[in-house]
Amino acid sequence: MSVHTTGPAGPSGRGTGGGAGGSRAAARRTGRGTRPRFGFGLVGPRRDRHSVPLEQLEALALPVGDDGMVIGVDAEGRPAVLGINRPVPYDVTLIGGLWTAQVLALRAAATGARVAVETGRAQAWTALAQAAGGGQPCITLHDVGRVPPQGASAGSPVVVVRDCGMRPPRGRVVSAPWQSVVTLLPYLSPVAPRLLEKSSLVGVQRVSPDEAAQIGRIMGLPRQEYETLSTLADGVTLWCTQGDRQFVMTQGTDAETGLLGGARRMD
């Protein structure tokens, strides 16, 4: 048995709404009762197409730069970005001050990396480790030679910061996919040539003229650039790769300055 439901009869004895034609018109207005199209669902609302003239297309571009953490600004004031979290082993050597290494650690943690600090001066890192991560252990401190395996992965990258003095021993935890190692040297030391040659990236802050000349020979720097190394201001670093060099000024944010103080080369 089928049941048919109609509206209340009008004066003509027919349903209100003007019969079948009125029902179809009402369905079009309300969207009810419209037959679904096979595989496509109901007919949706009609809108004008959004278009833009070809000559105006460039105005829609987004200023997206490299992926990574901002380590400062270059000579033209543009952000300098370091991609520290990589799917390949990545070694960084910084001949410079503790302040710069700690800023790099904080900014690496801000990108979502876990930071393991291997250091013989834990007291210099304790306040930073406690302040970072809002109570979460995103920066952990370890004695020299006591860094446990970190289990780095694409979803949980790791940065190991080695603050082990002038002659850092060979580390138990080395660079690996999604695990970068940053080695801090306060000055040029006998182990520096080996570290510089194996590093993917080298940072050099202010050093003595003799050290600058040695670094220039190791890194193949033009004389004008390596002579500049003995005159760099606090917070300025020359970052070098095999094919590129760039002077970068690192300035602390308000939070970083409140925690670490102003930029300085000497500790």
Image (cartoon, grey):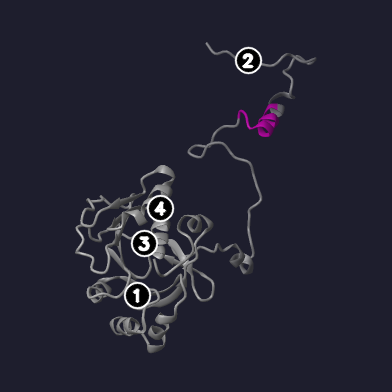
The front one of 8 and 68 is 68
Which is more N-terminal, label 4 or label 3?
A: 3
Front position among marks 1 and 2: 1
Describe the element under mark 3 as helix, strand or loop. loop
Q: CA distance from mark 3 to mark 4?
A: 20 Å
Which residue in the protein does label 2 denote? 5
Q: Which residues are magenta?
A: 23-33
Which residue in the protein does label 1 denote? 241
Which is more N-terminal, label 2 or label 3?
A: 2
Which residue in the protein does label 4 denote? 128
Type of residue at label 3? Ile
Q: Which residue lies at the image location 28% right of the left edge and 71% below the top edge?
A: 199
Front position among marks 3 and 4: 4
| Label 1 with label 3: CB-CB less than 8 Å | no
Which is more N-terminal, label 3 or label 1?
A: 3
Query: Residue 144's x, y, as percent?
Result: 23, 57
